[in-house]
Amino acid sequence: LYVKKGYECKKPLVIYNIFNTQDDNNFFNQKIIINVEENSKLDVVIYSINLNSVPIFLNTSNFFLVEKYGLLKLFHINQLNKKDIYYNLSETDILENGVFENLILPCNSAFYKDDIKCTLKGKHSSSFVNGAILSKNNTHQEIKTIIKHIGEKTKSYQKIKCVLSESSKSIFQGKIYVDKNAQKTDGYQLSKAILLDKDSEFDSKPELEIYADDVKCSHGSTSGSLDKEAIFYLMSRGLSQLEAKKLLIKGFLIDSIESITNQEIKKYFLKKLEEQINEHR
């Protein structure tokens, strides 16, 4: 897909992956290539759903180019089943003053991995990665990012939040690389997790590799349980314990979605987040 120079798409492009296989032919490969040319804008929603109980393996690779003053916003959401496997690789090159935004809302597939590679090649180029993960039923959810700052005065922002229960596991491995010529770089990375039981696990590996001396880069990672005092306070205001927990989980995850500027997409993602939260007990 090529978005020609100076063209702004008024509505988002939605790519549907709908699977209804009934036999053993359940391995699917997909490649998406998008070039957003100079001064162009595009919102893309990639939606995947498995309609049957037959397990599938979905393997996708995406290659994006955001040219000068271009804007590409990518939204991942899927409703695969608890026995499905999903692997996604995204590679994005961003030129001068280009902006790439990526929001991830995984599902409870047995294994989910999102491998994101962004190269900020041009001056003043930017990359934003947000993720909201709810994982349960012994599932594995993983996000790996490599953000390379090559041009001067580039900016990257990463925020991944996870809520884990029922022996599930989540991994975040994020790396910020700053080239020796990438002066005035601004890189930020944060991962947080709430563990709802003692059998769930969150692993975080933040990395900084910096070769320039005039930069502002930071990373952080925290994990813990729900605040018992906050639960007690909400229960004293008339909520049940389950309602109080769900409200705190929503408040923890929602800021990843609040960053969405397209109101229709935001409304849809909030609805899907509510559905996933209501499935937790």
Image (cartoon, helix red, strand yellow):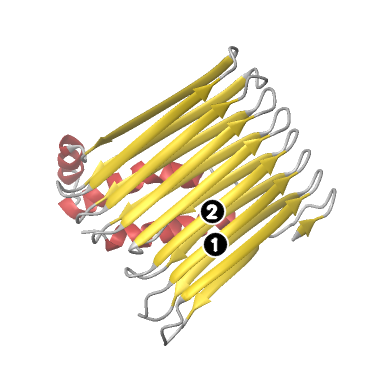
Question: What residue lies at 46% left-to-right and 71% top-to-bottom?
Answer: 49
Circle 1 SS class: strand
Of the residues shown, which amino acid type is indicated by label 2? Leu
Tell me, yes or no, whether the two marked residues, 1 and 2, touch with CB atoms within 8 Å. Answer: yes
Q: Is residue 124 above or below residue 40?
A: above
Residue 50 image point, x, y percent: 44, 75
Relative to 85, 75 lies left or right: right
Find the residue positioned furthest to the right: 5
Q: CA distance from mark 1 to mark 2?
A: 6 Å
Residue 18 image point, x, y percent: 52, 76
Q: Quadrant of the N terminus?
A: bottom right
User: What residue does disc 2 label?
Assistant: 89
Residue 231 image point, x, y percent: 18, 42
User: What residue does disc 1 label?
Assistant: 60
Find the residue positioned furthest to the bottom: 22
Whichever of labels 1 and 2 marks the residue nearer the N terminus, that label is 1
Few, some or many residues within 10 Å of mark 2 (<14, 14–19, 20+): some
Few, some or many residues within 10 Å of mark 1 (<14, 14–19, 20+): some
Of the residues shown, which amino acid type is indicated by label 1? Thr
Question: What residue lies at 38% left-to-right and 36% top-to-bottom?
Answer: 191
Circle 2 SS class: strand
Mark linked to residue 79: none
Find the residue positioned furthest to the top: 213
